[in-house]
Amino acid sequence: MVYIVAGATGVLGSAIAEDLSKNNKIFLIGRDKEKIESMSNKYNCSYALLDLNNPIPQREFKNVINSEIEIKGLVNCIGSVLIKPLHGTSIDEFYKIINTNLFSSYYLLSTFAKRMKNGSAIFFSSVAASLGLSNHELISAAKSGIEGFVRSSAASYSKDNLRINAIAPSIMKSNMSNKILSSEQAVEISKSMHPIPKIGTYNDILPVVRLLLSDESEWITGQTINIDGGLSKIKPR
Ligand SMILES: NC(=O)c1ccc[n+]([C@@H]2O[C@H](COP(=O)([O-])OP(=O)(O)OC[C@H]3O[C@@H](n4cnc5c(N)ncnc54)[C@H](OP(=O)(O)O)[C@@H]3O)[C@@H](O)[C@H]2O)c1
């Protein structure tokens, strides 16, 4: 039985891989050969390379995991962000954001869903999917797509007892947010936007990942769990 972590070399992906590896067999997916190889040595697990910017294999990608191995969980941490005035964005930037965030989710679930009876899959949305934030059009479109994709696929595969959910964080410390949080002033502005004023970390996300992958959440499917200090839903006075 194995848990797949895609985007395993990112901040969230590596934290989830580390956490899952303590009690489970994991399988890693990443694009950086050196980094993913060193993780696979550390956790004594197999891996596959996948770079969404390059041509990728069709359905045969499912063969990276031996067909006899049961896939219990899939967590897609592949993602990217772009915050830019819409009129200044290029068509290439649009496709890249959709590709990395939405297409990666489609690709992984369509590849592995039929092998995930009694399993759980998790995809990452963003607060930008449910709250209109200026200059977030591209990421909002991609992440809103993920939320719809999660609802529909959860309906399709409920007959297999495959549960499919999304987690929608607000801004967290990670590689992709480095630039956005590059100054003390930017950090303070970001914090102050949140009803609970802080920048998130992977530690805010891990407990929910554990819950959604475990049988304790056996009746939770098709949901988006917002982890955002309240930003998406509440406005304190
Ligand atoms: N950090 C935030 O503020 C924030 C907020 C809301 C939602 N999220 C979502 O949370 C998830 C995890 O992100 P994170 O915070 O852990 O960010 P991160 O550290 O930047 O990780 C992003 C991951 O995506 C991989 N990736 C990017 N482009 C790729 C491509 N073309 N092909 C294959 N892999 C690619 C990266 O690979 P490399 O390691 O090789 O670069 C990395 O593993 C993402 O879906 C993100 O959109 C994050």
Image: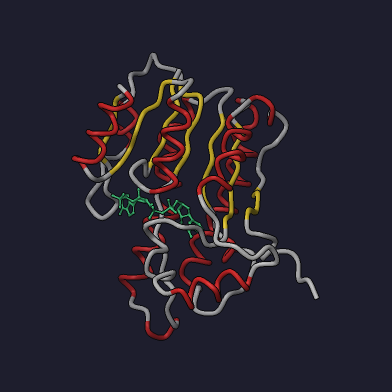
Query: Is residue 203 rendered to the left or right of residue 183?
Result: right
Tell me which colouring the rendered structure shows: secondary structure
Q: Residue furthest top?
A: 68
Q: Is residue 67 above or below residue 35?
A: above
Q: Is residue 147 above or below residue 127?
A: above
Query: Is residue 225 rendered to the left or right of residue 169?
Result: right
Marker count (numbered):
0
Question: Which of the image's four quarters has the C terminus?
Answer: bottom right
Answer with the quarter of the image where residue 13 lies: top left
Question: Which of the image's four quarters has the N terminus?
Answer: top left
Q: Position of residue 41 (x, y in %)?
A: 25, 26
The residue at the point 67 percent across, 38 percent down is 221
Q: Position of residue 43 (x, y in %)?
A: 33, 25
Q: Residue furthest right?
A: 237
The residue at the point 52 percent across, 52 percent down is 201
Q: Is residue 210 above or below residue 151?
A: above
Q: Position of residue 51 (x, y in %)?
A: 26, 48
Q: Nearer the viewer, residue 56 or 84?
A: 84
The residue at the point 53 percent across, 58 percent down is 145
Q: Position of residue 210 (x, y in %)?
A: 58, 33
Answer with the quarter of the image where residue 144 lies: bottom right
Q: Is residue 233 above or below residue 32?
A: below
Answer with the quarter of the image where residue 181 lies: bottom left
The residue at the point 42 percent across, 31 percent down is 4
